Image (cartoon, rainbow, N blue to C red):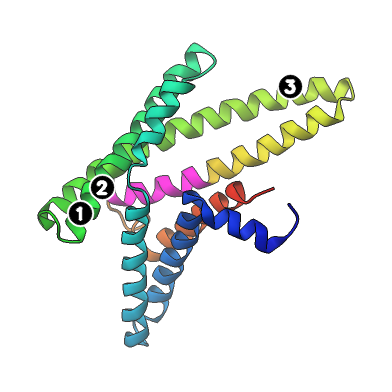
């Protein structure tokens, strides 16, 4: 597939593809709101509405997403005892994140008690943070393992396998970048602080995560 429009159509047909696009809207609008809040209040109000609508839309798109982690553990828990251990915590954290995110969404749109939103947000963010930490560890281990394997293959002049390892490393680095950025966003919910909760920190973190995910999901 070489046509850009064809690739874009395939990308946007995926749940992860449309999520990354709307996530871009969400965090660009957050940065716009921060930039013009003091000088152009009408534009700031519109940007805030776009941000909120994008965030709620993403939560709707993620309905049932917690089953992905469950299925990953059921189908491919890991090739070694260490990876099975890491995969349990990584996917369990992600499952908690997506499951309680349903209730956060329902609370924010008024279907259930709005007072539950803060509690659901905390539980969801805590599970998200736990999952990201273990996913980052797993990717780091695999990158390190790949570098060792690459040196052996370079000595044997196996260029095709070296290329595959390099491509895999790029994808894992993109995943780590996205997970670290999302971890910062999760920490802003778990333990609010001036750095993580600053609009610029959240905006840049959200865009790093969105664009790293865009790169990983873009059709080759």
Give coordinates of residue 109: x percent, y percent: 20, 61
Q: Whole-Å distance between the Cαs marked 2 and 1?
A: 6 Å
Q: Nearer the viewer, residue 77 or 212?
A: 77
**Residue 101 in magenta stretch:** no
From this viewpoint, is residue 211 visible? no
SS under mark 1? helix
Instruction: Decide if residue 165 is on the left or right side of residue 138.
Output: right
* Mark 3 or mark 2: whose residue is earlier in sequence: 2
Asked if residue 169 is positioned above or below residue 89 in the image, the reply reads below
Name the residue that disc number 3 marks. 149
The range drawn in magenta is 178-190
Name the residue that disc number 2 marks. 102
Numbered disc in front, either 3 or 2: 2
Residue 25, image quadrant: bottom left
Asked if residue 2 is positioned above or below residue 81 in the image, the reply reads below
Residue 203, image quadrant: bottom left
Q: Nearer the viewer, residue 86 or 218?
A: 218
Give coordinates of residue 22: x percent, y percent: 44, 62
SS under mark 3? helix
Asked if residue 136 is positioned above or below residue 121 in the image, the reply reads above
């Amino acid at each position: 597939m070489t046509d850009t429009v064809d690739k874009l159509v395939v990308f946007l047909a995926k749940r992860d593809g449309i999520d990354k696009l709307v996530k871009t809207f969400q965090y660009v609008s957050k940065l716009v709101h921060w930039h013009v809040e003091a000088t152009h209040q009408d534009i700031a109000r519109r940007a805030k509405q776009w941000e909120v609508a994008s965030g709620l839309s993403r939560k709707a798109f993620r309905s049932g997403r917690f089953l992905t982690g469950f299925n990953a553990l059921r189908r491919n828990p890991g090739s070694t005892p260490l990876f099975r251990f890491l995969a349990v915590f990584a996917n369990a954290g992600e499952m908690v994140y997506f499951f309680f995110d349903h209730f956060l969404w329902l609370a924010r749109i008024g279907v259930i008690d709005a007072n539950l939103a803060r509690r659901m947000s905390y539980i969801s963010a805590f599970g998200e943070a736990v999952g990201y930490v273990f996913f980052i560890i797993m990717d780091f281990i695999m990158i390190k393992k790949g570098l060792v394997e690459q040196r052996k293959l370079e000595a044997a002049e196996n260029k095709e396998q070296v290329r595959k390892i390099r491509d895999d490393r790029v994808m894992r680095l993109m995943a780590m970048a996205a997970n670290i950025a999302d971890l910062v966003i999760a920490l802003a919910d778990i333990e609010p602080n001036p750095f993580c909760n600053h609009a610029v920190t959240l905006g840049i973190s959200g865009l790093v995560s969105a664009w790293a995910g865009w790169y990983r999901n873009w059709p080759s």
